[in-house]
Image (tube, grey):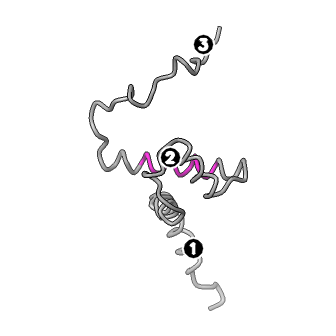
Amino acid sequence: MYPTAPSASSAPQLQDLTLVKAPDAGQLDNIKAHLDLVLLAIEALTGLGSEAMLAAAATLKVEGAVGDRVALWRLRQSNPHRKSSAAAKSSMSRKPAPWS
């Protein structure tokens, strides 16, 4: 059979979760990129925007990590995948027209 999900009472608490070592810069970039993709999916599937995300951060008591709407936007724009896709789109739009 399938394993059962842990109940709310048996789920680990934040203070129980410890890092063996701090992530390096590359790992932090990957974490940011994945979190941005998860947030993008939540926005697309639920229609929730930045205000709802900020409210959820306050509920989870992590608003210090997110800040305000501008800080959230800056955090999301730091995703390296966004930069590369934006650069690829802009370079495609700069190709000369075949008739010129």
Let me know if residue 12 is in the magenta part.
Answer: no
Let me know if residue 37 is in the magenta part.
Answer: yes
Q: Which residue is situated farthest in the top direction here?
A: 1
Could you tell which of marks 1 and 2 lies nearer the N-terminus?
Answer: 2
Q: Please name the residue shown 59% across and 18% down the image.
A: 7
Residue 8 location in percent, x, y? Answer: 57, 21
Residue 92 location in percent, x, y? Answer: 57, 73
Front residue (pair 42, 37): 42
Q: Magenta span: helix, strand or loop, mainly?
A: helix
Could you tell which of marks 3 and 1 lies nearer the N-terminus?
Answer: 3
Q: Is residue 98 left or right of residue 21?
A: right
Residue 85 location in percent, x, y? Answer: 53, 63
Task: Tell me if I can see residue 21 in this picture.
Answer: yes
Front residue (pair 56, 79): 56
Distance, label 1 to label 2, CA atoms, is: 26 Å
Question: SS of the residue at dot 3?
Answer: loop
Residue 34: numbered disc? 2
The vertical placement of 94 against 49, above or below, is below
Mark in front: 1 vs 2? 2
Badge 3 amino acid: Pro
Q: Residues within 10 Å of mark 2 (few under 14, many from 20)?
A: some
Q: Is residue 32 left or right of residue 43?
A: left
Badge 2 amino acid: His
The vertical placement of 67 against 21, above or below, is below
Judging by the rendered image, the residue that carries numbered circle 3 is 3
Q: Quadrant of the N terminus?
A: top right
Q: Please name the residue shown 39% across and 51% down the image.
A: 29
Judging by the rendered image, the residue that carries numbered circle 1 is 92
Question: SS of the residue at dot 2?
Answer: helix
Question: SS of the residue at dot 1?
Answer: helix
